[in-house]
Image (cartoon, rainbow, N blue to C red):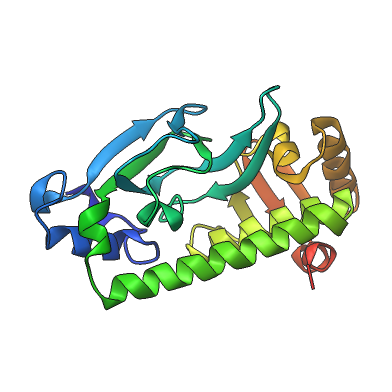
Amino acid sequence: MLCVTCPNRDSGSCGTLLEAQSRTAHAVHGSNGPLLQIARPGEQIVVRNQTTQQVLVLCAGWAYRYVELADGRRQILGFLLPGDLFSVLNLFEPLSQFSVAALTDVQVSRFERPGVRARGDRLQLVLENASRDEHAGAIRLITVLGKCSAEERIAYLLTHLARRLRARSVIRGQSYPFPLRLRHIADALGLTPVHVSRVLSHFRDRGLCVVSNGVLNMLDEPELDRLGTVA
């Protein structure tokens, strides 16, 4: 089974959910693992205000949570990395409060909610940690959007993603995979793509970082971190 060799099984939520599912008759594929879904870049995985009886975890690739207004404007709420739950609330509430789309080619695991909710102290710890991280992240993002300059917002996003990637041990030196386009950064930070491009060029000229060909190269991470730190 693919999940057995997955590098994110222990660092993400998947391992605990697999243990939970293996003890219940509610599993989609019995005890052999979750239902797996493949999505291409730009493909919608979750639709806002629709219901699902499954708990979703990103196995591979990048995705993002977002809300789209009636006129087509979009607010990206956050980026999902391998091992991430789509949302803690998804374990308790079948109605999705946001949409999710694939940023790259992705693989998603779908676990049946009743079986997951019925299992274990370790699952409770995973949920507590995920809830804490989601809440703290929401507070930081509200602060960044409400009070920080464009430079500070972008520095925050870059260093925040770098720390998350480093925790998953997927870095080579100071280079990080970075599939975000200008429009993704803009929609996450309340800016325009033109403004984002201008700031990234300024960062490059100052020797802070370079974003090129899907890779983020951190040239002066301490200074970038200082600029993007939310007290």
- Horizontal side, residue 191 vs residue 214: left or right: right
Residue 207 position by quadrant: bottom right
- Expressed as whole percent of the image width and height from the top left, the position of residue 158 reads 70, 54
Q: The C terminus is located in which quarter?
A: bottom right
Residue 20 position by quadrant: bottom left
- Expressed as whole percent of the image width and height from the top left, the position of residue 226 reads 82, 68
Rendered position, 39 above or below 149: above
- Horizontal side, residue 72 vs residue 20: left or right: right
- Horizontal side, residue 23 vs residue 212: left or right: left
Q: Residue furthest top?
A: 71
Residue depicted at x 37% and y 46% = 94
Rendered position, 17 above or below 213: below
How many numbered dots are placed on residues in this image?
0
Rendered position, 78 above or below 196: below
Tell me if I can see residue 174 in this picture: no
Residue depicted at x 60% and y 49% = 78
Tell me if I can see residue 83 in this picture: yes
